[in-house]
Amino acid sequence: MNPETKEKIDNLLQQNKILVFMKGNKLMPQCGFSNNVVQILNTLGVPFETVDVLSDYEIRQGIKEYSNWPTIPQVYIDGQFVGGSDILIELYQKGELQQLVEVALAS
């Protein structure tokens, strides 16, 4: 990944408490996994932002390197990589996601 892409990702993570790198955006997800993540975050009623990896090839490839995670979507809370769709579903079902989000938004 080039330094510009890493800096762009760093800046996005600093500016957003909850950030999802996904296919499409929160109003129009472009894949089922991205849609799952959006639905969970909407259910929690928390503010979050999305980055459409389909519109930026450098980010699409760079985020996989950044997190050392091969798939999209990728969810970051308070600058920390949390996981993809399956992990988010699991955390939500256990009630752990709500706690993570509350702590991040309170800081």
Image (spheres, rainbow, N blue to C red):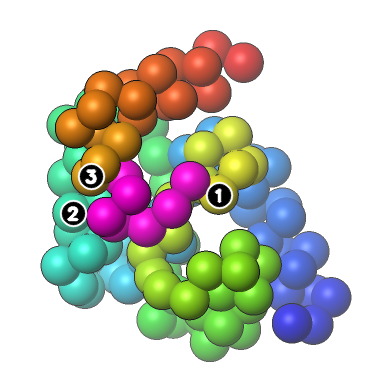
- Residue interval drawn in magenta: 82-88
Q: Identify which residue is drawn at 31% across, 36% down.
A: 91
Q: Is residue 97 above or below residue 59?
A: above
Rendering coords of residue 75 (x, y %): 44, 51
The residue pinned by badge 3 equals 89
Res 92 seen here = yes
Amino acid at dot 2: Asn
Q: Is residue 60 rendered to the left or right of residue 22?
A: right
The residue pinned by badge 1 equals 81
Where is residue 71, by image quadrant?
bottom left
**Quadrant occupied by the N terminus:** bottom right
- Tag 2 and tag 3, C-beta contact below 8 Å: yes
Q: Residue furthest right?
A: 3
- In whole angstroms, how far apart are the C-alphas of marks 1 and 2? 17 Å
Where is residue 35, by image quadrant?
bottom left
The residue pinned by badge 2 equals 36
Amino acid at dot 3: Ile
- In whole angstroms, how far apart are the C-alphas of marks 2 and 3? 8 Å
Number of residues whose C-alpha sits closer than 10 Å to that of mark 2, classed few (under 14), some (14–19) or many (20 or more): some
Say which element carries label 2: helix
Q: Residue furthest top?
A: 106
Q: Identify which residue is drawn at 51% across, 17% down.
A: 103
Q: In the rendered structure, which disc, 1 or 2, sits on the residue that comes first in sequence?
A: 2
Q: Is residue 36 above or below residue 5?
A: above
Res 27 seen here = no
Q: In the rendered structure, which disc, 3 or 1, sits on the residue that comes first in sequence?
A: 1
Q: Is residue 96 above or below residue 1?
A: above
Say which element carries label 1: strand
The image shows a total of numbered marks equal to: 3
